[in-house]
Image: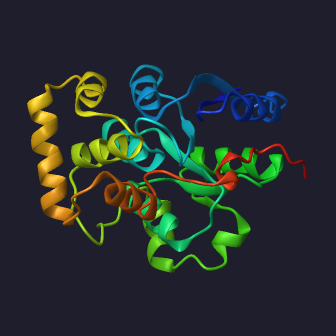
Amino acid sequence: MQKITVLIADDHALVREGLRAILRGEPDIAIVGEAATGREAVELVKTLKPDVVLMDIAMPSLGGLEATRQITKGVPSTRVLILSSYSDDAYVQQLAEAGGAGYLLKQSTSTDVARAIREAKKGNAFFSPAISKRLSDYYRESIVRGVPVKRRTELLSSRETEILQLIAEGRGNKQIAAELGINIKTVERHRQRLIHKLGIHDVAGLTRYAIANGLIETGAAARESILSQP
């Protein structure tokens, strides 16, 4: 039997261990790698080409939604399931825009996690029941087909989104340049474009914008793990 290959992407080792423990007993699923940042997940997918990625929405360095966007564009054969503590419609909309295959709440049962992986491998979408009930047909069909829907706004480029998250995480221009492998002047240009496009002129304002748009999460709820049983 050919197993479904899975990459686990979460910045908390305990969550990764919990997911590994949940999936260890599934005879048709094999975990082929783990990533602690969104950027690491993108790079590992290029190498490992797993069937499915379990992606935490709140990832450092590169958020889960932007990582999903880059994965679905670069390795379209890989399906991405988003993990989150939040069921807000805005997050689900962003999942559809990123081309994700489904959305699981971190309170999901082990049965739902395994089922979601199998459905994603088949090319189907899967959502936690609380989300599925109110998901619009428009977004559902887009996610089932694995085709990103048009964003309501194309305000920021992919690179600008990356830099915005790093600014919100407290990185300075030099640190951002080193992490992205670009020069400081390029970072400064992107930063000025962010200020111009968003009309926000301080780090606190950019951070609030990043939180409001799902680039970073705050609060204890973001730290819950999928350890519940059916």
Q: Where is residue 136 in the image (x, y as percent from the top left)?
A: 52, 79
| Quadrant hosting residue 68 | top left
Observer-nearest of 165 and 122: 165
Q: Seen in the image, is 177 located left or right of residue 72?
A: left
Q: Is residue 147 positioned above or below 33 on the image?
A: below
Q: Is residue 136 positioned above or below 192 on the image?
A: below
| Quadrant hosting residue 118 | top right
Q: Position of residue 116 (x, y in %)?
A: 67, 50
| Quadrant hosting residue 150 | bottom left
Colour option used = rainbow
Q: Does any portion of residue 172 appear in the rendered image?
A: yes
Observer-nearest of 76 and 21: 21
Could you tell me which residue is drawn at 90 percent across and 48 percent down? 229
Which image quarter holds the N terminus?
top right
Could you tell me which residue is drawn at 57 percent across and 58 percent down? 125
Q: Position of residue 173 (x, y in %)?
A: 23, 33
Could you tell me which residue is drawn at 45 percent across and 68 percent down? 93
Could you tell me which residue is drawn at 57 percent across and 53 percent down? 218
Q: Position of residue 78 (x, y in %)?
A: 46, 38
Tag count in the figure? 0
Q: Does any portion of residue 147 appear in the rendered image?
A: no
